[in-house]
Amino acid sequence: MPPSEAMRSFETFEHTADIGLTARGDTLEELFANAAMGLVDLIADPSGLRDTSHMEVTVSAPDQEALLVAWLNELLYLLDSKRYLPRRCRITRFSETVLTAELWGERVERGRHTLRRLVKAATYHGLRIVHKNGRWEGRVVLDL
């Protein structure tokens, strides 16, 4: 039985030529980790990824919403520059303006990994983070 919508950690929504990502979590750290995993799921089949390498990343931004965009764009930068995708992540430091995370994943290899789509960037269009019904929810539109 698929999890109910309230139980899901992320989902997509249609947006003209782009795609939207909604992530949820009991904490902001969980929301940001789930947004990362939602982004990875849009790009590639995560079941084909292994956690053969580890890295730590830190991003900063002027506010919480901008931090979500910076975080997702940092993951896209790692894919573009190092062909790296995380299979899992753990937020180790979090504030309104700074996020540090540990990533476990590997370099993407064509032929071994199933790539689903090219995501160019996380955007500020329709960006929001809200606390409702005891959970955090973030929405961001991704440029394809």
Image: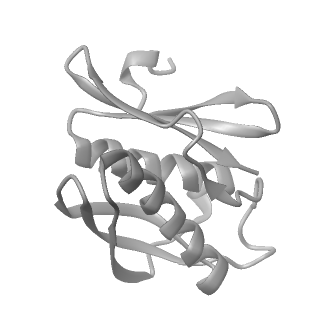
Along the line of sight, the residue nearer the viewer: 15 or 48: 15
Residue 44 appears in the rendering: no
- Tell me what residue is drawn at x 38 percent, y 45 percent: 65
Q: Residue furthest front?
A: 62
Residue 59 appears in the rendering: yes
Name above or below for residue 61 compared with residue 7: below
- Tell me what residue is drawn at x 60 percent, y 85 percent: 82
Along the line of sight, the residue nearer the viewer: 9 or 140: 140
- Tell me what residue is drawn at x 36 percent, y 82 percent: 55
Q: Does 82 sit left or right of 138 as displayed?
A: right
x and y, in percent, of residue 99 in the image:
27, 63
x and y, in percent, of residue 22 in the image:
50, 33
- Tell me what residue is drawn at x 49 percent, y 37 percent: 127
Name above or below for residue 3 compared with residue 43: above
Q: Quadrant of residue 91?
A: bottom left
x and y, in percent, of residue 98 in the image:
24, 64
Q: Does 98 sit left or right of 71 as displayed?
A: left
x and y, in percent, of residue 131 in the image:
26, 25
